[in-house]
Image (spheres, helix red, strand yellow):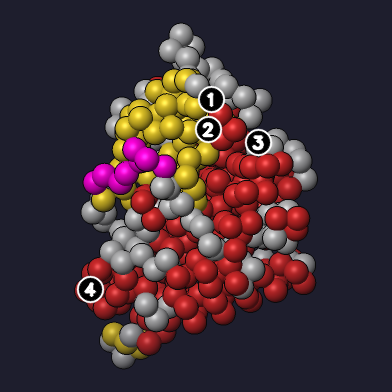
Amino acid sequence: MNNLLTDTQKEIVTMAAKFAAKEIAPIVEADEKNSYFRRELFYKLGEAGLLGITADPEWGGTGLGTLEYSLLLEELAYYSGGYAVSVSVTNLPQSIIDKFGIREQKEKYIPDIVSGKKIGAFALTEPSSGSDATGIKMKAEKKDGFYILNGVKQFITNGEFADIFIVIARTNTEHRSKGTSAFIVEKNTPGLRGGKLEKKMGMRVSPTQEMIFENVKVPEKNLLAQEGMGIQIPFTALDSGRLSIASIANGISRAALDRAHKYSKEREQFGKPIFDFQGVSFLLADMATELEASRSLMRTAAMLKDAGHPFTLQASMAKLHATEACMRITTDAVQILGGYGYMEDYIVERYMREAKMLQIVEGTSQIQRLVISKNLN
């Protein structure tokens, strides 16, 4: 499929692959075991021009599209699903501010994210609301030129490592779907602090943390768009986020397939490589087919978005298929490696643990099926 890419797109794939092989591959296993997040990677990504692919050149970006950005994420995820997730989440404030922010907000925040000087986070989920984004309880009360935020956000990727948060809070208790608004909140704002740092099955290099807001004063000028648009903003972001997760799933699937294929050629049983047995080679054939289908769905959705067409349906299809396929592909990779597949030294067990998370974030597989069914003509 890469033969169909433009020269610019091929260049991004090459740059991202070289960066990840040099900067991520040597340290990812140790970082995963120690749940260690390397902040400096974002500076290096910024210096390499890999954090501003979709950002306007006015703010330091390259002004390319979603397809180019998805190629970056797939290459990063080939080496580390966790770091790829953190990159995708730091891009969310950038893209949200670019779409909904005023010029002053864009000028202040986007260049620092593009350069890697600052990391972004998206604070939507709460202890009592996940898939139901209309159930937000965090309050934002307007007073003397500020909004006062009180509440708790849960499972926030990048957590207190982030410098810029997009926070969804309730400004009107009488309207469920139109009663929330979005705010830009800076890390050092008094009253904002990190809570519990989650211990996860996988993606351990990517911090996931509770964030606590106690009388956090946010200037009126940090309101995004208008009051009551708090649901529209995350729904827009979720469509794009689903393409990011699909891209990450494809990168992990490709890594698992490559390792399983290589092992099947080297491992001998009964006097010949196990690849020569149909039980293994046909399994690899199914894995490769699923990956190719997932990449096609993702790229179709990305092209629809870049062309300005509706892509909600295709984004959910891409996310659903890619993450479900990733779970199957990584599980089958473990099976092909047999006992070795279950051991940490052979890495494929990490791929399987990473795959599970992707079926949950940015809307579970069940939510994707709901979105798809509602958008069928």
Please give the label number shown on residue 219: 2
Residue range of the region highlighted in magenta in the rendering: 189-196
**At 47% from the left edge and 20% from the top edge, which residue is drawn?**
143
Q: Is residue 337 magenta?
A: no
Label 4, label 1: how many angstroms apart (C-alpha)? 57 Å
Quarter placement of the N terminus: bottom right
Residue 93 position (above or below residue 2): above
What residue is disc 1 on?
Answer: 145
Q: Nearer the viewer, residue 109 or 270?
A: 109
Q: In this orientation, does residue 71 appear?
A: yes
Q: Quick one: label 3, few (<14), some, or many (20+) residues within 10 Å?
A: some
Report the residue marked by disc 4.
Answer: 343
| Pointer 3 residue | 100
Question: Disc 3 or disc 4, which is closer to the eye?
Answer: 3
Q: Residues within 10 Å of mark 4 (few under 14, many from 20)?
A: some
Q: Is residue 284 visible?
A: no
Identity of the amino acid at label 3?
Answer: Phe
Q: Residue at x 56, y 35 (%)?
A: 222
Pinpoint residue 236: horizontal percent, then vertical percent.
60, 35
Residues packed near mark 1 inside 10 Å, few (<14), some (14 to 19) or many (20 plus): few
In this orientation, which residue lies closer to the viewer: 219 or 334? 219
Question: Where is residue 232 drawn, in percent x and y?
Answer: 58, 28
Mark positioned earlier in the residue sequence (3 or 4): 3
Q: Is residue 144 left or right of residue 273?
A: right
Camera-nearest label, 1 or 3: 1
- Which structural element holds mark 1? loop
